[in-house]
Amino acid sequence: CDGNPHSHKALTRTSQTDKKTPRTAILIGIHLCGTLSSVAVQIFQKVPLLSSLILSPCCMPRRRRKKDGGYKLLTLAKSLHQTPHQMWCWTLLYLLKSKLPGARTDMLHDSNLDTTKKTVPDKAKNVFIWALRGKV
């Protein structure tokens, strides 16, 4: 998919071409910048062929634009003593849980993952969010 939330239609059409052969797919998003992570959540929500989602968000949305969901991540992060990236990950997990109530979802923090950036280790962007549909 090209980041367009409507491009899921092509994937859905492809999955329906051969009804006799059951198919499944996994959506993996690594280092998704800005709102591309929320687009991955939307695609996972809209395409039943996708049985699982593995997401490792990178950057958070640059602005609080209404079309991007109006996230107030910096304000929330500061008030909750979290990093903005942590708030973005929690927001994405909440989006998954609210859009797919029957799916199993969770978030993992890999403390063994190294970063080349000069940051404090607990601020490294080493979070993985996953979702698994209840029925495939």
Image: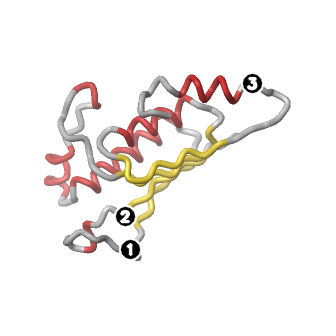
Please state the horizontal and vertical placement of residue 125, each as a whole percent of the image. 32, 62
What colouring style does the render use?
A: secondary structure
- Separation of residues labelled 2 and 3 (CA atoms): 38 Å
The residue beneath circle 1 is 111
The amino acid type, in three-letter code, at marker 1 is Ser
Residue 35: quarter of image:
top left
The amino acid type, in three-letter code, at marker 3 is Thr
Please state the horizontal and vertical placement of residue 87, each as a whole percent of the image. 27, 51
- Separation of residues labelled 3 and 1 (CA atoms): 43 Å
> Which residue is situated farthest in the bottom direction here?
112
Q: How many marks?
A: 3
The amino acid type, in three-letter code, at marker 2 is Asn
**93 w.r.t. 3: above or below:** below
Residue 133: quarter of image:
top right
The residue beneath circle 2 is 126
Tell us which disc is closer to us: 2 or 3: 3
- Viewer-proximal residue among 49 and 11: 11
The residue beneath circle 3 is 17
Residue drawn 46% across the image and 48% down it: 29
- Viewer-proximal residue among 102 and 21: 21
Q: Are marks 2 and 1 in contact (CB under 8 Å)?
A: yes
**125 w.r.t. 69: above or below:** below
Residue drawn 60% across the image and 46% down it: 26
**6 w.r.t. 90: above or below:** above
**44 w.r.t. 16: above or below:** below
Mark nearer the N terminus (2 vs 3): 3
| Element at label 1 | loop
